[in-house]
Image (cartoon, rainbow, N blue to C red):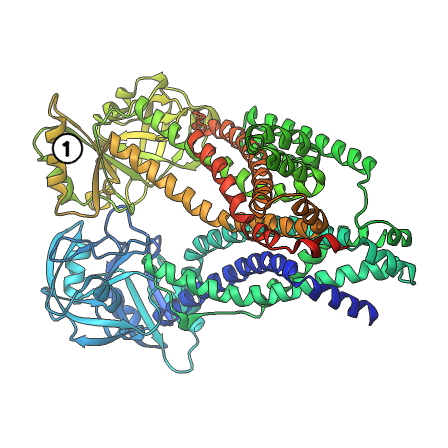
Amino acid sequence: MSVLKTSLRNFFAHKGRMALSAVAVLLSVAFVSGTLVFTDTMNTTFDKLFASTASDVTVSPKGAAVEDETPQTGRPESFPASLVEQVRKTEGVQAAQGAVISTSVTVVDAKNKNVGPTSGAPTIAVNWSVNELRSVDLASGHEPRGPTEVIVDGATAEKHGLRIGDELRTISVTGDFTAKISGIVEFKVTNPGATVVYFDTATAQRELLGKEGLFTQVTADAEEGVSDDTLKRNIAASIGDGYKLQTAAEAADAGREDVAGFLDVMKYAMLGFAFIAFLVGIFLIVNTFSMLVAQRTREIGLMRAIGSSRKQVNRSVLVEALLLGLFGSIAGVAAGVGLAVGLMKLMSAAGMELSTRDLTVAWTTPVVGLTLGIVVTVLAAYIPARRAGKVSPMAALRDAGTPADGRAGRVRGGIGLALTAVGAAALVAASRAAEAGPGSLWLGLGVVLTLLGFVVVGPLLAGGVVRALGVVVLRIFGPVGRMAERNALRNPRRTGATAAALMIGLALVACLSVVGSSMVASATDELDRSVGADFIVQSGTGQPIVPQAQAALEKAPGIDHVSEYKWVDATVTDPRGKTTKADLAATDPSYMKDLRRETTSGTLADAYGKDAMSVGSDYATEHGVKVGDVLTLAFKGGEKAKLKVAAITADTGQVDKGAMYINVGTLAEYVPAERIPQSLLLLSSAKEGQETQAYQALKDALAPYPQYKVSNQADYKEELQDQVGQLLNIVYGLLALAIVVAILGVVNTLALSVVERTREIGLMRAVGLSRRQLRRMIRLESVVIALFGALLGLGLGMGWGTAAQKLLALEGLGVLEIPWSTILTVFVGSAFVGLFAALVPAFRAGRMNVLNAIASE
C-alpha cells in the first residue's frame, strides 16, 4: 500500500508533465480504437445492405461478374426468361422474380453532369420489381410505367438536386436513352454510396442487355419450413448445371469478400500509422520518466536510506507508468469513437455514405486499446524504473542528478554503429538485388536495423551534429546561442532520444517523397520514350468505352487514326502443353505507332497478321517459346484458336509489360460480336500540324459523354503527378500524428529541463540575463534539437528511398529523383516545429521568480 501511495503522490505532483505523456498515449490509442470502430462500422453497414438485398436463393450465370465489377463487354451475363418460370415451378419455391442488374452504365442529368458517385462506388441500373421493396421504400412518386420513366435513390437525388419530372440520360453499350424521374426511393439501410436507378423490366432488358426476354438473375424465396440449403439443392436439380446458385448467407459472404480487400487495406494501413505513433510515443515516455527519475535522485536515495528496497522503488515508477497508461488509454478509447465519427463524416463528404446509426463499438475495441496503451507505457517506463531501483542511499548526500556512465555510453555507441553498419549493408544488398522478392526482404531488414542503429547511436552523434548546427544556426545569436548549444549538449542521451522521436516521422516522409518523385519521374520518362500517340481517351473509373462515344471520336476532324485497346480474357497453352491465363491485348495495327515496343525477336507488325500474335519476353523465357511456335488460345465466350508467335516483345518497362498482342480482326474471327470486349482505352494521333485543333475536336466529340476524358501527353503526366501527390498527401496527413507526438516530446523534454535547471536559471537571471534572452535561449535549444532530429531523419529517409527506388527499377521504375524542394522545406519546417514546441516552456521559464529559483533545491 505504501508503494501505491508513493506512486500516486509522485504521479499527481508531476501531473503537468504526465499530462503531456498521457496525450501521446491518448493519440496513439485513439488512432487504433478509431480505426477499429471505423472499419467495424463499415462492415456493419455492408452486412446490413447485403442482408437486406439477398433472397433465400439467387441464381446467376456461371462466371458472371460480381455486382460492382464492370463487364468488359459492357453487357452483364444473362439467360432466357424461361428460366424464371422453371425456378418458380421448383418444389419449395414460394416466389421467384427475374432481375436485370448492370453496372456498365453512366447516368447524366439535364446539364450533362454525371450523377454517379465519385468515391469508386458503382452506378447500378436495375429493373423495378416487388423484390426491390426488400431494401427500399418508394418515398415519393410511383414506379416506372414505361420506357420514359425512371426511379432514382434519394441520396443521389438530394446530392444532385434532382426532383420528380427531371430528365436523366442513361448511357450504355446499346445506346443512349432518356427518361423522366417518376419516383424517389429511400434505402431501409445505409446505402454506402452507390447511385441506383430503376427502370421497368422491358426497358431494362432492351436498353441494358440488348433485347427483351433476358435476365441476369433469378431470386427465389422458400416456402415456410424449407431451408435455404434445401431450396438451393432443389433448384440445382431442376435447372441443371451452368448456373451459379447462392443462398442468402453465401451471397452475403460473397459481397463481404468483395469489399474485404478494400477494408483490410484501409484498416491495416491506418493501424500501421498508429504503430508509428506508438513508437514515437515510447521515446516521449522514456524521456519523461528518465528525467523525472533523475530529478528525484535525492528523494529516491532518501527512500532507499530509510528502508525502501530496489524492488519497491522500481515498482513505484512502474505503478506511475501504469496510471499514466490507464488514464491515457481510457481517454484514447473515448477519443477513438469520436475520431471514427469524424472519419465517417469525412468519407460521407467524399461520397461514401456512412451513418452513425450503424456505429459499431465491439467489446474488443476498448480491450485492445486499453491493453495496448497500458502495455506500451509500462514497457517504455521499464528502463527508467530499473535505473531508479539502482539509486543508492548515498545519492541522498549528493546534488540531484547522477553522472552519466561513460562505459555504458561507449557500449551503446558501439552497438548503435554496428546496427547501422549492418543495416546499411542490407540496404546496399537490396539496391543490388536481381529479384524483387529477396530484395524486399533485404530492404525491410535494412530499414529496421538502420532505424534502430540511429536511435541507439543518436547520443553519440549529438555532440558533433549539434556543434555543427550551432556554428551555422546558433552562433549568430551570441552568448545566448552558445548557452542554448551547451544546454542541448549537456545530456546527449536526452537530446538523442528527443530528436529520435522526430527523426522517425521525418525519415518516413523523406523516404516516401523520394519513392513518389522517382515513380513520377520514371513514368514520365517512359511516356516520353514509348508513347507515340498524341491523345489518350479513357474513363477514370475503368468503364469500357461505349461504341457511340468511339464513333464520335473517329469522326472528329483533324484525327489521323484511333487505335482500339481491348483486354481479352483467354487462356494460353504453350507447345509443352502448359496452360496459363493470358494478359492478352487486342489492338489495331496502328497501335504500334501509338506505343513503341522493342522486340527481342521477330517483327511486331507480323503479329498483326492473320492467325498471328506476340508474347512478352518473360513468358517466352519461362515457357521456352520462340518465334514460329504455335500457341493454343481459348477465348472466353468464343472458340479456340491456334496462333503463331510472330514477335517477342521486351518486358523492360511498365507500360504493357507482359502483354500479348493480337489484331482486333483476329479476335473477331473467334469471338462472337456480342462477346467481344469493349475498348478500355483509345489512343489517337492528329494529322500533321493539326494537334491543337484535333485536341479540341476530341473534347467536343466527347462532351456528351462526361465519364470519359481526353488527355494529351502533358495532361497525362500532370494527372499522374497529381495522383501520386494526392496519395502522398494522405500519407503525410497520417504521419502528422507521429509528428504531433514528437512535438509533445520536445515540449515535455524542455519543460522538465527547465524544472531541472530552475536554480541555474535563477542565477543567470540574477547576473543579468533578461527574460527575453532566457526565452530565446530555450527556443534556440528547441530549434537545434528539432534540426538535429530532422537532419538524421531526412538523411535516413533518403537512404531508404534510394534503396527502394533501386529495387523498383527491377519493375521498370528506373529513374531516381530526389525531391530537394520537399526535403529543404521539411528541414526548414522542423525549425518552426522546434520554435512552436518551445513556446510554453520558454514562457514559463521567463515568469520564474528569481529569488525563489535561486533558493530551490
The answer, for residue 647, to whether it is visible in the render is yes
Q: Is residue 738 above or below residue 567?
A: below
Q: Secondary structure at mark 1?
A: helix
User: Who's the residue at 68% across and 57% down the image?
Assistant: 377
User: Who's the residue at 65% across and 60% down the image?
Assistant: 18
Residue 382 location in percent, x, y? 75, 54
- Which quadrant of the figure has residue 3? bottom right
Mark 1, residue position: 695
Using residue 165 as the reference point, say whether residue 358 is left or right of it: right
Mark 1 is on which residue type?
Tyr
Residue 42 location in percent, x, y? 43, 63
Which of the pair 397/805 is nearer the observer? 397
Task: Say few, some or many: other residues with alpha carbon within 10 Å of mark 1 (under 14 / 14 to 19 / 20 or more).
Answer: many
Which of the pair 771/309 is nearer the observer? 771
Q: Is residue 843 above or below residue 10?
A: above
Which of the pair 167/576 is nearer the observer? 167
Which quadrant is the C terminus positioned in? bottom right
Which of the pair 203/546 is nearer the observer? 546
Residue 770 location in percent, x, y? 59, 45
- Which quadrant of the figure has residue 668? top left
Q: Is residue 430 above or below residue 59?
A: above
Using residue 375 as the reference point, say whether residue 793 is left or right of it: left
The answer, for residue 515, to whether it is visible in the render is no
